[in-house]
Image: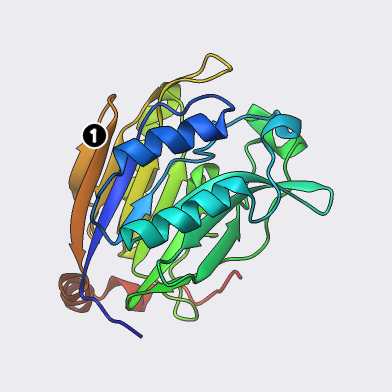
Amino acid sequence: MEIQNKLKISLIQYDVIWEDAKANHTYLDELLANHQTDIILLPEMFASGFSMNVEKIGQKPFGETFEWMQHKAKELNSAIAGSISTHENDKYYNRFYFICPSGSIYIYDKKHLFSYGKEAGVYSAGDKIVTIDYKGWQIRPIVCYDLRFPVWIRNTEEDPYDLILCNASWPKARREAWISLLKARAIENMAFVAGVNRIGVDGYNLQYQGDSHLFDTLGQDLETINNHPEILQFEIDKEEQDKTRKHFNFLNDRDSFYFG
């Protein structure tokens, strides 16, 4: 297994084209042309926007957007991650795919469905915590509303991780919660947290500010972008994280319960 001490992550913040997968694929093809990185993280439901119109946007498992992701991972020699409205066994899931350039695939179904936005009445919740093993890093994927629930994301001795990847469609009206929760999850878990959000206005007339961020192990804001389309790329260092964890040793004092 390849082990890489430093990892480059690219957050792709853009105005998702409403309910049009092919148009989003085309836009991203142009944006990502020749881009070099280790991980590409796309917003929640990046091919459609956060739509409840599942009859229109729902794709079969390993459907057209998954195939686009596979192609892009191989083309750019980078892992690519994002969630897709997925139809399987008469249910719909907000499904996060992490696809490695080697062809390895990790799948996480969003656990906490946003009842205020009617997601819980349309989609089905996942029930499994997933930890991705990529280039020697242990990575925990979560989707948007999951961010509000710290027990689900707890960094435990039984299933430890180094990095949280959170993709979202988080409206501007609650942007302070988005930023504060990303930072809190970094501090309490002594992990890097990368959060990508969309911008623009969606089909329900909700506005999005972006505010994609990277927080380090102590909750310091390393990078951010506000309300414009951009690729935010940064490099994180596992050796530095290990030194910080060893020095402060906070994780040794955590509660012993395990939720998984």
- Using residue 238 as the reference point, say whether residue 110 is left or right of it: right
- Using residue 8 as the reference point, say whether residue 134 is left or right of it: right
Residue found farthest to the top: 205
Image spot of residue 244 (x, y percent): 18, 71
User: How many numbered marks appear?
Assistant: 1
Say whether residue 146 is visible. no
Q: Residues within 10 Å of mark 1 (few under 14, many from 20)?
A: some
Q: Decide which of 91, 157 is in the foreground and name it.
A: 91
Q: Residue 14 sits in which quadrant?
A: top left
Q: What kind of residue is marked 1?
A: Ile
**Secondary structure found at label 1:** strand
Please give the name of the residue rendered at 20% of the width and 62% of the height, measured from the top-left corner.
Answer: 236
Residue found farthest to the right: 90
Q: Decide which of 45, 64 is in the foreground and name it.
A: 64
Q: Residue 116 sits in which quadrant?
A: top right
Image spot of residue 207 (x, y percent): 44, 18
The relative height of residue 77 versus residue 3 in the rendered view (above or below) is above
Residue at image mark 1: 225
Image spot of residue 43 (x, y percent): 44, 40
The relative height of residue 66 versus residue 101 in the rendered view (above or below) is above
Say whether residue 27 is visible. yes
The relative height of residue 238 versus residue 191 in the rendered view (above or below) is below
Image spot of residue 55 (x, y percent): 76, 32
Quarter containing the N terminus: bottom left
Q: Residue 129 sits in which quadrant?
A: bottom right
Please give the name of the residue rendered at 15% of the width and 71% of the height, measured from the top-left corner.
Answer: 240
